[in-house]
Image (cartoon, rainbow, N blue to C red):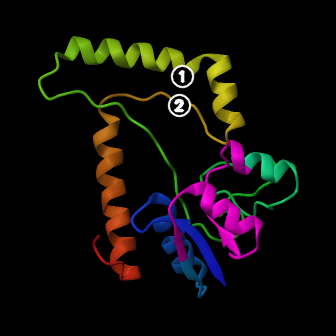
């Protein structure tokens, strides 16, 4: 079996390594330059599977019946009829992408608080939430204190995946 992902070290590649580990399957990871390249290989059946976010291109391929989603790697379903990995018996296959804005050290706390307040309000807007959901994501605001914790936890998790998979530093 071939597992198409983007280049070594990318989130797709690392998620593929985690999937192989927790699913206990032997699959050759085939790295491609871009996500569209991965999708094209999947459509041409030169790869057996891939791990990707349900982006616009992938979503249209799903809607057209060209590809079939098997599991969602988050804690909630990103597509209504697709079970989470935990629901499918792989509770340790959890890959959640998140985004954060960073400011230079020394930025006044009032400026950080104002930016955070505005961003949380924007993310809560129904049209923003709807659009992000259409892309398979979940819009959720947070606090400036949460990002360092998320980052620290992700670094530890992916460091362990890299070590277990024997992925060379690039």
Residue 144 at x, y percent in the picture: 31, 29
Name, please, the residue furthest toward the left: 106
Residue 1 is labelled as none
Q: Is residue 55 left or right of residue 10?
A: right
The residue wearing badge 2 is 140
User: Is residue 109 visible from the viewing direction of this image?
Assistant: yes
Q: Give the image quarter of residue 27.
A: bottom right
Screen quadrant of the C terminus: bottom left
State the extent of the magenta-drawn residues as a range.
Answer: 30-58
Which residue is located at x 42 percent, y 69 percent?
Answer: 8
Q: Nearer the viewer, residue 170 or 149?
A: 170
Number of numbered discs overlaid on the protein picture:
2
- The 10 Å Cα crowd at callout 2, few under 14, some 14 to 19, many 20 or more, is few
Whichever of callouts 2 and 1 sits on the residue coming sooner in the sequence is 1
Residue closest to the eye, 8 or 17: 8
Is 95 displayed left or right of 79 in the figure?
left
Q: Position of residue 66 (x, y in %)?
A: 84, 59
| Residue placed under numbered mark 1 in the picture | 123
Q: Residue at x 20, y 17 (%)?
A: 109
Residue at 54 percent of width and 78 percent of height: 29
């Amino acid at each position: 079996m071939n597992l198409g992902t983007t280049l070594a070290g990318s989130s797709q590649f690392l998620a593929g390594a985690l999937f192989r580990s927790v699913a206990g399957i032997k699959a050759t990871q085939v790295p491609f330059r871009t996500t569209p390249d991965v999708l094209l290989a999947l459509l041409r059946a030169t790869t057996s599977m891939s791990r990707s976010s349900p982006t616009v291109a992938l979503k249209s391929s799903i809607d057209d019946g060209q590809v079939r989603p098997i599991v969602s790697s988050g804690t909630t379903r990103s597509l209504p009829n697709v079970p989470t990995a935990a629901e499918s018996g792989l509770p340790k296959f959890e890959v959640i992408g998140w985004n954060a804005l960073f400011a230079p050290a020394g930025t006044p706390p009032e400026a950080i608080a104002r930016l955070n307040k505005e961003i949380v309000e924007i993310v809560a807007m129904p049209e923003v939430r709807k659009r992000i959901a259409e892309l398979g994501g979940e819009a959720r605001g947070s606090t400036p204190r949460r990002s360092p914790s998320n980052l620290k936890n992700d670094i530890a998790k992916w460091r362990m995946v890299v070590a277990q998979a024997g992925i060379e530093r690039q």
